[in-house]
């Protein structure tokens, strides 16, 4: 017998067996304490009231996760404190993957503005980035401006320019304050209890302008009841390809990159296999052609596939960005 060939064949067989075991393991459910995950219903806490962007996207995601993982994913709204109530609740729950949080940009902004009961990089584990919506400057049609240049020329002459947002400590609030700081113009924040009343007042002319996420104002833009002036994100959006960014209006706006984004989080210490399973499933769901189209119809969009390390890096970069903006603008949560 050719022992060299025998040993080579046996090594190849062993390698093939090991490869098969690895593939089989990757196809198995994740394991948390007590067995395969998920073995029971999962609660998805939404830190905002029903009906907004966070709630709508969370319910669409929960439905898909339920179908794929064969356990109920139950959305539970816990609003309050601009997302702080729901966030702190989830941070206190067991790190077993059965209580998750969907939060918006305020998750990374609020800790830079006030004392909160969580650390955005330590209390919870970033699992996946879900979607984003551009933040837009919109004006009542009575404002004599059709683009950013005309708007800035008009704003320069005004003694006071109230701008409405969905509330304090969100990306729209900070976007408006950033605009005030860079221009030196007299923009004054008017926080509302939600996007709808702020948008309605801008439509009615009670305030001349608002800074809002695209989902909240798209219908009013389409109907002509609000006029879009600029996209505050770094690049033009496929949702509004003809709308220039504020960066295009001048070099002083070169650092602007403001949009509302949603992330899913788990309590710190959640087992790595559970995090990996959820990250993989959510990436597949949120970036599928079907979900991309659903988001587009609601004037939002996916942020692309990000593994766990990329998700953590994204959240950390957002924490650093908004901490810098808060310091530069000197804004507080009460403004």
Image (cartoon, grey):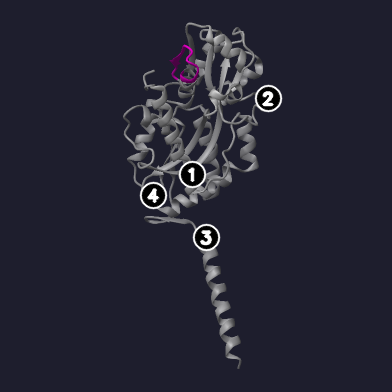
The quarter of the picture where the N terminus appears is bottom right
Assess disc 1: are there few (<14), some (14-19) or many (≥20) residues with their C-alpha within 10 Å of its C-alpha. Answer: many
> In the image, residue 111 lies at what x, y percent?
36, 31
Which numbered disc flags the more N-terminal residue, 1 or 4?
4
Alpha carbon distance from label 1 to label 4:
15 Å
For this orientation, the residue located farthest to the right is: 242
Q: Which residue is mark 4?
A: 270
CB within 8 Å, label 3 to label 4: no
Asked if 209 appears above or below 310 in the picture, the reply is above
Alpha carbon distance from label 3 to label 1:
21 Å
Q: Residue 242 — which label?
A: 2
- Which of the pair 31/246 is nearer the observer? 246
Q: Label 2: state its secondary structure.
A: loop
Q: Residue 311 — which label?
A: 1
* Mark in front: 2 vs 3: 2
> In the image, residue 182 lies at what x, y percent?
49, 20
- In this rendering, would 146 be left or right of 109? right
Alpha carbon distance from label 2 to label 3:
44 Å
Q: Label 4: state its secondary structure.
A: loop
Q: Which residue is mark 3?
A: 26
Residue at 55% x, 8% y is 204
The range drawn in magenta is 181-193
* Mark in front: 4 vs 2: 2
């Amino acid at each position: 017998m050719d022992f060299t060939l025998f040993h080579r064949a046996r090594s190849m067989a062993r390698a093939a067996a090991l490869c098969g075991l690895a593939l089989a393991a990757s196809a198995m459910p994740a394991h948390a304490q007590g067995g395969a995950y998920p073995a029971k219903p999962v609660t998805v806490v939404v830190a905002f009231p029903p009906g907004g962007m966070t709630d709508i996207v969370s319910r669409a995601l929960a439905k898909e996760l339920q179908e794929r993982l064969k356990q109920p994913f139950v959305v539970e709204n816990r609003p309050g404190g601009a997302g702080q109530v729901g966030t702190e609740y989830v941070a206190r729950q067991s790190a077993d993957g059965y209580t998750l949080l969907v939060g918006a940009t305020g998750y990374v902004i609020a800790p830079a503005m006030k004392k909160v009961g969580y650390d955005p990089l330590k209390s919870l584990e970033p699992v996946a980035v879900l979607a984003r919506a551009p933040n837009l400057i919109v004006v009542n049609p009575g404002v004599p401006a059709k683009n950013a240049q005309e708007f800035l020329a008009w704003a320069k002459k005004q003694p006071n320019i109230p701008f409405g947002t969905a509330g304090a400590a969100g990306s729209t609030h900070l976007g408006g304050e950033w605009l005030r700081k860079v221009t030196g113009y007299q923009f004054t924040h008017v926080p509302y209890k939600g996007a709808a009343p702020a948008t309605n007042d801008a439509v009615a002319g009670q305030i001349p302008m608002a800074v809002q996420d695209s989902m909240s104002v798209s219908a009013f833009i389409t109907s002509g009841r609000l006029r879009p002036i600029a996209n505050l994100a770094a690049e033009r959006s496929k949702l509004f390809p003809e709308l220039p960014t504020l960066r295009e209006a001048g070099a002083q706006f070169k650092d602007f990159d403001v949009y509302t984004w949603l992330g899913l989080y788990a309590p710190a210490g959640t087992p790595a296999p559970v995090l990996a399973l959820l990250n993989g499933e959510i990436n597949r769901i949120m970036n599928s052609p079907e979900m991309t189209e659903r988001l587009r119809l609601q004037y939002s969009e996916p942020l692309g596939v990000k593994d766990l390390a990329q998700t953590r890096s994204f959240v950390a970069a957002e924490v650093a960005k908004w901490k810098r903006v808060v310091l530069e603008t000197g804004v507080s949560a009460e403004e």
